[in-house]
Amino acid sequence: MRTVDPAKHEAKRRHILAAAAECFATKGFESTRTADICASAGMSSGNLFHYFPSKQAIFLAIFEQDGRDNAALFEQAATAHDALEALLGFAEFMVAQTDYPHLAGLMLEVIANAKRDAEFAALLDRNDRANRDGVTMLLRRAAEAGQIDPTLDPVATANWIMVLIEGAFVRSSADAGFQPYREKASLRRIIIRFLAPGADTAS
């Protein structure tokens, strides 16, 4: 019996997901055929179906992998010595993904699939809640360490930080001139000043 190399299997799986994401973003989900994905990934249909049973399964897997990657990052961050730096690292990691050249097309397909596929919509919701919970956890740790304003509500603050991150995706997909992944210093400054102890709270 042939032994599967887990590292090679995972690398091939991610290669397929990257190839499929480009197809979905440039051709649209409905117009993308499994043959297109096979051609982009450089593999036969038989090999492709060894990894994924259908086109829809591939689309779901792209965002399941996204959730796993973020969960792994938060797992590391949970034991980081500097919670604030871990939070900033997460924000930078997320915004760095806006350099994806087909971001606008992929976002359109995400919206369309969420409307017609309840399973996919539920996956997006789980990923979103996991991200907000992870940010909330880091905010609580940072407040306990005296790194940020302890009077800030961690749940509400996490929501606003996620709005900032998600807004970078929306804006960069609509405006090619806006490249948030090149402006990490500004992102850090905004978050640090927002969280700083003694920051103005006048309404």
Image: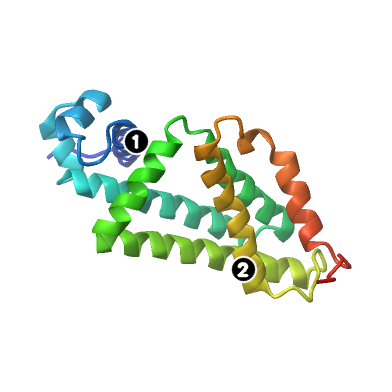
Q: For this view, does 13 lie left or right of residue 148?
A: left
Q: Nearer the viewer, residue 156 or 148?
A: 156
Q: Would you identify the image quadrant in which residue 149 lies? A: bottom right
Give the percent coordinates (x, y) of residue 170. Answer: 52, 46
Lower position in the chain sequence, tag 2 or tag 1 = 1
Give the percent coordinates (x, y) of residue 145. Answer: 79, 68
Q: Nearer the viewer, residue 69 or 192?
A: 192
Q: Nearer the viewer, residue 48 or 105?
A: 105
* Residue drawn at the location 37% of the way across and 44% of the way down: 108
Secondary structure category for the residue under label 1: helix
Q: Are marks 2 and 1 in contact (CB under 8 Å)?
A: no
* Residue drawn at the location 62% of the way across and 73% of the way down: 155
* Residue drawn at the location 64% of the way across and 59% of the way down: 161
- Amino acid type, mark 1: Ala
Q: Which residue is mark 1?
A: 25
Using the image, tell me which numbered label, if any, was put on residue 136.
2
Q: Would you identify the image quadrant in which residue 30 lies? A: top left
Q: Residues within 10 Å of mark 2 (few under 14, many from 20)?
A: many
Q: Residues within 10 Å of mark 1 (few under 14, many from 20)?
A: many
Secondary structure category for the residue under label 2: helix
Q: Examine the rendered structure and indicate whether residue 6 appears above or below residue 150.
A: above
- Confirm whether residue 150 shows in the render: yes
Using the image, tell me which numbered label, if any, was put on residue 17.
none
